[in-house]
Image (tube, grey):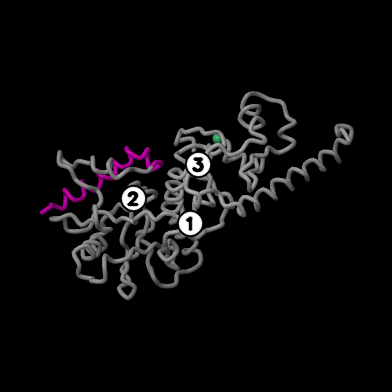
Amino acid sequence: MWSDVDEVALRAEAMEWLAAWTNDGLDAISYEDLDDFRFRGDKFPLRDRQLGIRKPAGMSSAFSITTTYRAPGQERPYDDRLGSDGLMRYKWDGDNPEKYTNRGLRAAMEQKRPLIWFWGVAQGIYKPIYPVYIVAEEREHQQFVVATDGLQNIESTGRDVDEVTKRYVLQETRRRLHQPVFRGLVMQAYGTRCSICMLRHSALLDAAHIVPDADPAGVAAVRNGLALCKIHHAAYDVGIIGISPGYKIGVREDVLNEVDGPMLEFGLKGLHGNKLSVLPSVRKERPDQSLLERQYRRFENDSVSRRLRADFLHPTDSPG
Ligand SMILES: [Zn+2]
């Protein structure tokens, strides 16, 4: 049997180890790498090879939970897992409430133990989210209520909460769970490279949304995402760069007419007319053309209205 002290130490060490391996949560981790964790010299698997819930023998409560990767098109009920209170739900293992795995999660709830949630972002690749806490059980739906860090003391889960609390809970769940998982999915799909310039420094890359807030309540789909470096992400968001539904890059007219140093010349102006350099190999993960079109129309309108404004303010600069 594990002592209380050991259980607490194990959880803390496992989370520190994950932080070191994943660049403080920026990167995902493979199943093989997960196998390397050791506690006091002995191998300790962080997730169960077969089951969603890891309840180690001799431990009083569950240690981790896993959500398996589903390729796009396969059933992936993300939104079913988000409760109306903004907290996530995790299904029982099977339908027997007394199965040892379900009892283990219940014990983690009673003992308020921090757990690790492994989210599959590709075959055998996981984004670990931690710590998370089981804060309630909904037996009628055969599921547990999971809170990310900071939300473990939110009360009245499962019931109607006031609007302010709900908005806060949603925002936190989004920041600590949905966005990291979205990042993991997008980075896997793009091989951790900027789609525009191919830069591959994970610390300089973002998972950008094509249309902001297209899916405020859940993990956005990869086809509403693009892996972009920091500068191209910002340039896309403010409309300096546009991406056509045919994946062609456009640079805003007034910027094309500017003269400046190498970042402007090569990093922005030089891209005009190019196609995206990196696209997911899986067709269903590629940027959605109707979403791109929606943003591209705004980019073009903005370009035109800037030209009209410039012509109006400085009529002599205009060639026509
Ligand atoms: Zn880039």
Tell me the distance, in whole angstroms, between the alpha carbons under discs 2 and 1.
17 Å
The residue that disc 2 covers is 130
- The label on residue 206 is 3
Residue farthest along the bottom direction in this orientation:
140
Q: State yes or no: discs 1 and 3 in contact (Cβ < 8 Å).
A: no
Q: Earlier in the sequence, mark 1 or mark 3?
A: 1
Q: Which residues are magenta?
A: 1-27
- Main SS of the magenta segment? helix
Tell me the distance, in whole angstroms, between the alpha carbons under discs 1 and 3.
19 Å
Q: Earlier in the sequence, mark 2 or mark 3?
A: 2
Frontmost residue, 256 versus 313: 256
Residue name at image x 25 percent, y 58 percent: 51
Residue name at image x 28 percent, y 66 percent: 92
Above or below 112: residue 268: above
- The label on residue 171 is 1
Quadrant holding the C terminus:
top right
Where residue 141 appears, as percent x and y from the top left, is 34, 73
Dot 2 alpha-carbon crowd within 10 angstroms: few under 14, some 14 to 19, many 20 or more: many
Dot 3 amino acid type: Asp
